[in-house]
Image (cartoon, rainbow, N blue to C red):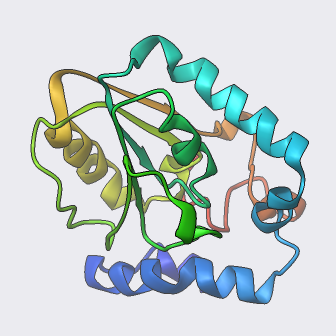
């Protein structure tokens, strides 16, 4: 199915995006994204690594957006450092939604229609997201980010590079990304 997803139309991708992570986590309960949540030292290391990347761009007046925040642990932690944080994702993966900070909001969207005002955000961040986007959607994603950023805003992102990959499950059977990494 994943190889066929590269041939999917935008409308078909909207449907795939809604369910792909729910299906993955149901079929692979020991997936690292789930198991790393159990290890406090891994969580702390991950938060520090991301904060190191963005700290020079944020302050207490910043409006921050994280695309693909997953469990939202980093985004929620960042609420202590900025004015407001938006987590933008295709699925809700928050474990404890009862204790969210007042300056945090999770926005679930279909990968295309983002309901956020133009020129409203200071910093947009994504970590390990771009490689999951369909090749036809990458330019659209960057345009969407540009629209929500303020004129002097910054988009920081990390993504694996194909020269050192593939970085998804395909590394065990191929020299090219063939799983959830649609392009590295």
Residue at 60% across, 77% down? 21
Quick one: 35 or 95, which is closer to the camera? 95
- Compared across the picture, whether 107 is left or right of 175 comes to left
Image quarter where the N terminus lies is bottom right
> Residue visible at 72% across and 80% down?
25
The location of residue 92, given as percent across then percent down, is 50, 73
Total count of labels: 0
Above or below residue 107? Residue 50 is above
Q: Position of residue 167 (x, y in %)?
A: 75, 49
Provide residue 97's location: percent of width, then percent of height: 54, 69
Task: Please name the residue shown 32% across and 58% down the image.
Answer: 137
Answer above or below: position of 114 versus 91.
above
Q: Quadrant of residue 151?
A: top left
Give the side of residue 128 with respect to residue 90, left or right: right
Q: Residue at x 75, y 62 (%)?
A: 33
**Along the line of sight, which residue is nearer the eye, 4 or 55?**
55
Please say if 39 is above or below 95. Answer: above
Residue furthest to the top in view is 56
Q: Is residue 181 left or right of residue 171?
A: left
Q: Nearer the viewer, residue 78 or 4?
A: 78
Q: Residue furthest left?
A: 118
């Amino acid at each position: 199915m994943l190889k066929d997803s590269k041939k999917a139309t935008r409308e078909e991708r909207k449907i795939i995006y809604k369910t792909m992570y729910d299906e993955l986590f149901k079929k692979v309960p020991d997936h690292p994204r789930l198991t790393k949540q159990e290890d406090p030292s891994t969580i702390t290391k991950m938060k520090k690594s991301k904060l190191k990347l963005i700290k020079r761009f944020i302050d207490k007046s910043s409006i921050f957006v994280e695309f693909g925040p997953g469990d939202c642990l980093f985004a929620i932690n960042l609420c202590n450092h900025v004015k407001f944080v938006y987590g933008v994702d295709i699925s809700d993966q928050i474990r404890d939604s009862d204790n969210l900070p007042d300056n945090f909001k999770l926005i679930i969207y279909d990968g295309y229609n983002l309901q956020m005002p133009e020129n409203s955000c200071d910093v947009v961040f994504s970590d390990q997201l771009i490689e999951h986007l369909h090749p036809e959607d990458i330019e659209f994603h960057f345009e969407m980010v540009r629209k929500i950023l303020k004129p002097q805003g910054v988009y920081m992102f990390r993504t694996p590079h194909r020269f050192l990959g593939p970085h998804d499950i395909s590394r065990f059977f191929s020299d090219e990304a063939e799983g959830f990494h649609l392009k590295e």
